[in-house]
Image (cartoon, grey):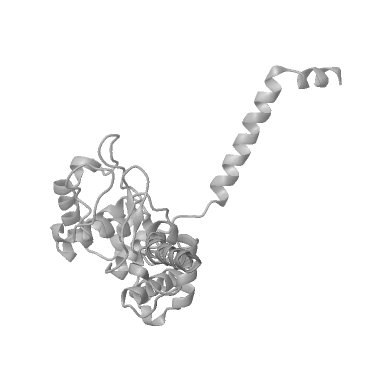
Amino acid sequence: MKRLRTGRRSPLAALIVLILGLSVTGTAYAALQPKATPGTASTTVSTQDLQEGRKLFLANCASCHGTDAQGNDTAGPSLVGAGAAAVDFQVSTGRMPLAAPGVQAPENRDAVAFSDEEISAMAAYVDSLGPGPDVPKAEYLDVEKANIANGGKIYRTNCAMCHNSSGAGGALTRGKYAPSLMNVEPQHIYEAMLTGPQSMPVFNDENITPEEKRDVIAFLKDIEEGNSAYGGQSLGSLGPAGDAMFVWTFGIGLLIAVAVWLGKKAA
């Protein structure tokens, strides 16, 4: 008993307990964390297409992301585990290959230099390097099956603080911005939610289900088509800026007019 009490007072006892605690916590986290869903793009194309995708990658992407796609500290991040959806989104919207370094890769559809087949081959090659999110299935892009009201609720909870309540986009910190979501392909909206490009958080299928992603897309397309002005008059869909301009122009002007009228009546 005396030896046991002495051991408890030892300076190494706290260190041993800390190491054991960290080991147990790390083991539990590794066992319980959600598993990444393997992509399927690399299994739906031929070996020849994968080889073609690798050639395209080495010619157009390796200068930044490395010949093994593991990235480097100064140019581009690792693409191992990025998945086919990330490649399709970045390349199909003209964001990649990046034209010049900057705080954010801008969309440039006129700069898309690859065919759909070439993009699919590159996406399949990157997908073959490690499991990652795959491109969405057609059923999750069919807005006819969607619940627009539910999509609006999900959008306002998760997206409106950056992209504006009407999807018009907005400014972020350090020169970055949330782009407009108008006239964006449904597949690219879905892929952005799934992969979290730039400063956007990742909304995997456990955060927002595929059906809910479809609802969000339907909500945005409903706004785009001008079917609804949620919350009243859109005022240019500029959010608080439009409201403030309306209040200042008409509200303050009306108050001034009333003050002048009262002054003249008193005189």
In-image side of 130 versus 113 (left or right): right
User: Relative to residue 220, is residue 115 drawn left or right?
Assistant: left
Q: Is residue 263 above or below residue 33?
A: below
Residue 1 to residue 188: above or below: above
Looking at the image, the residue that sits furthest to the front is: 267
Looking at the image, residue 161 sits to the left or right of residue 136; the answer is: right
**Residue sitting at x 14%, y 57%:** 111
Q: Is residue 53 visible?
A: yes
Residue 183 place in picture, x, y as percent: 27, 69
Q: Splitting the image into 4 quarters, where does residue 14 fall?
A: top right
Q: Residue 192 appears in which quarter of the rendering? A: bottom left
| Number of numbered tags placed on the structure image | 0
Quadrant placement of the N terminus:
top right
- Observer-nearest of 170 and 127: 170
Residue 67 seen in the figure:
no
| Residue at (39, 65) in percent of width and height | 246
